[in-house]
Amino acid sequence: MANTIPVELQREQERIEKIAREMGLTFFRVIFEMVDWREMNALAAYGGFPTRYPHWRWGMEYAELAKSYQYGLHKIYEMVINNDPTYAYLLQGNAMVDQKLVMAHVYGHADFFVNNVYFAHTNRKMIDTMANHATRVRRHQERHGIETVERFMDACLSVEDLIDPGAVFRESRRAELQVDEPEPQDPGRMPAKAYLDRYVNPPAYLEEKRKQVKKAREDAKRFPPSPDRDVLGFLMAAAPLEPWEQDALEIVRDESYYVLPQRQTKVMNEGWASFWHTHMMTTRILDDTELIDYADHHSGTVAVSPGRLNPYKLGLELFRDIERRWNMGQFGPEWDACDRMAERQRWDRKLGRGREKIYEVRRLHCDSTFLDEYLTQDFCERQGLFVSKTNARTGKEEIESSSFDDVKQALLFHFTNGGRPVIEVLDANYANRGELLLVHRHAGVDLRTDWAKEVLENLTRIWKRPVRIETQIGKKPVRLGHDGDKPIQEDLDQAALKSKSR
Amino acid sequence: MPRIESDVNRFRQIVRGKVREELQKHLGKTELFGKQGGQVVSIPIPHLELPHFVHDTGGKGVGQGEDQGEDAGAKAGDQPGAHILEAEFSVEELATLLGEALELPRIEPKGTDELTSPSGRYTGIATSGPESLRHFKRSYRQALRRLIVSGTYDPANPRVSLVRADRRYRTWKPRPLPKANAAIMYVMDVSGSMGDEQKEIVRTESFWLDAWIRSHYQGVRTVYIVHDAAAKEVDRQTFFTLRESGGTVISSAYELAARIIEERFPASEWNLYLFHFTDGENYSRQDSDKSADMLAETLLPSVNLFGYGQVEALGTRGDFIDVLRARFASDDRVALSRIPDRDAIVVSIKDFLGRGR
């Protein structure tokens, strides 16, 4: 792709890039492309990539975007792809000041992609990889029929988020070899003289020990040996798949791992980019005539529409708060211990370590740890955060609580695992019938059952045998499932659940 | 970005498939065409989403705002919202889907006279015509041919100029169009015994009848007649909303229909469709017989199809359908149908349109 922006924008790009470097941002080469609104919407439908495998959901996305753009409901200003070089798109027809704002914002993202640890393992040649994926899927479609491939992809996509966020940071567990040891003859038996044997090695104890060892060996025979959170990876390795099916599943899994850090760092990423665009624009880039337009558009991006949580706003304010606190030394045990209001208000140790601190934060955190670590009660009150809940009677959303603990808990719930339930593979040979058993690590909120049933049905297309999931509905443990023809629902008593989960 | 087009097309294909599958379900719904804007109908298709394992949060979310007034609790930004997709269909498309779903035969229009339409297509070349239609290439080619034949063409100095005889003009061929005019006459009983629900059924059914017949003719005319003890012609709006409370004299409506046909729609030139919706409780047996006579003598000879739909309110049982059945059971032009409730609409449409007339 060639650099398609006009000369005056190229000049601006050079200037902004220089400023960004001077401010300490580091990034791959950034390439801007100028596109019209149709292309912009198409790119947005494809998640930013010019080439994606053929699938109806991009079409649906595009149809919706195009319609809402035509009705004037949204306008996409910027899009940037985590890639080396980093690609970003500018919308044709935007005012110069908007283009500058977008560029400054993009350099913030580009720095985040390079430096945040959660992005360290992402594929930096993803544009090429996506194009290859597209070719592979097209080839499968030509060979096996569009509909067949599409149905299978639908099934894979409905479990696309069942991956293990920690997996990128460790060695593959699947590589571990199990060494077969001979079964111990008499486990736990101590050497003892015959007449003492009854006391040194009580039969009840030996019996229990034998059972333990037996269970351990049984467990070792289980597959997977311990619950596996990378459901997609597990399916790839263990499901009876045609080669093309395996390939399709791999494509979905690859792309899922690629977008994972973006899901994990939405607030930080946007907050960081907004922090830098405001800083660069107001100190170095703007000229006098552009100030009002800039202020108008910037306030648009960080606006809180009634009650809606705006990641740009939340992230920006939190980064600013961290910078302020570390500049003034408002952290550490001394600060925490201080309970005199007046003193806290005057508190300024003139440390000036704010800038350094936010660089560190952007390197080490993802949204959930970011909020867990730096969301303070002061901040929460100043920002007017609250927990809302739909009133079942009136159908309206109402403020349920604005207490710090509730807000923080709700935010953390929302940002842990992308707000999605944690699902693991428990047993691939359930009931010794080669059926798949998943488990939902219930964290106080039930699954949406109508969707869960559909997902289970989709899973039977991949596993090709009945699939079940252990979960709870209204505090009652149940096992939902699907056998390919009809859904299954089995009630479990508490005891049965305990013995199953390890 | 043409690549997205193929995905959009694929998506639309799937949507059409879904709508076709569920068309039977949509047929009886009034809200379907209640949303009609112009010639486009929106059909809601829920759940064209990929299901995932998600939490059932019960509408809980985190919000932000200084003004925690009444409106400060809109939806949290993360919820994927229960968005319902709407597919837009033109009425013709719907008619096609209807035809496919109910396996309706196509209508064979009667009347094979050809009508010369004033418009045509540019298909030929003539030696005379208006300058605005001059065919530049063909004219010069003709001139070149003339020069070569007469031996005055000089390849070293290839100058070609037109003379009057070289000029060629585009010309059009008039296209004969089959003359197939169609008119639909809806007759509805608005007597006191026809309730709102019955009218809704009539409304729904006539929407589909209309869609199907329109898809076979150009410029279909419609006539609406309401009757209780007396009949009058009304506009569409009135037709569906009017509520009278008189008795029922069916012959009055047939008289009016016959007069309108005679005045405006001579049977030799028009494909006429007459649909009559009533609860079938006529004022007297004599009038029923009189109506049946009129039908046999004046109406049936002029129409392609006479559809009689008996819309029955709970507990009523009109007998006009029996009178008609006794007289016309074997007549191909007459379709009789009982519509006791919404679910019967589909069957009734098939009764009416299943003959391809």
Image: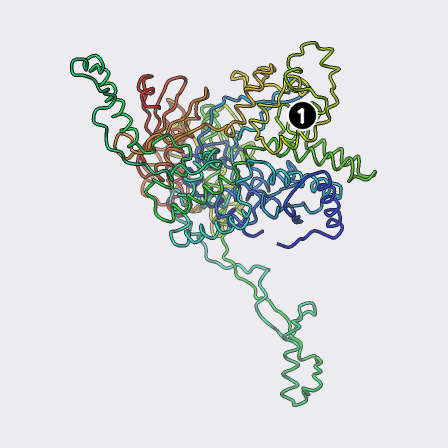
Q: Note whether residue A431 is visible.
A: yes
Q: Residue furthest right?
A: A288
- The residue under label 1 is which amino acid type? Ile
Residue A311 occupies quadrant: top right
Q: How far across and down, in percent of the image, does residue A59 sit?
A: 52, 44
* Residue in the foreground of this view, choosing between A344 and A30: A344
Q: How far across and down, in percent of the image, does residue A303 sit?
A: 68, 28
* Residue in the foreground of this view, choosing between B64 and A257: A257
**Point 65% across, 89% down: residue:** B150
Q: How far across and down, in percent of the image, does residue A354 sit?
A: 70, 27
**Point 57% across, 66% down: residue:** B173
Whether residue A364 is situated above or below residue B215 in the rendered picture: above
Q: How far across and down, in percent of the image, does residue A216 sit?
A: 29, 26
**Point 56% across, 16% down: residue:** A406
Question: In the image, is A283 to the left or to the right of A248?
Answer: right
Residue A356 occupies quadrant: top right
Residue B198 occupies quadrant: top left
Whether residue A142 is situated above or below residue B230 in the rendered picture: below
Q: Secondary structure at mark 1?
A: helix
Q: Pointer 1 indicates a residue of which chain?
A: A
Residue tagged 1: A322
Q: Residue furthest left?
A: A194
Q: Note whether residue B252 is visible.
A: no
Question: In the image, is A109 to the left or to the right of A59?
Answer: right
* Residue in the foreground of this view, choosing between B95 and A122: A122
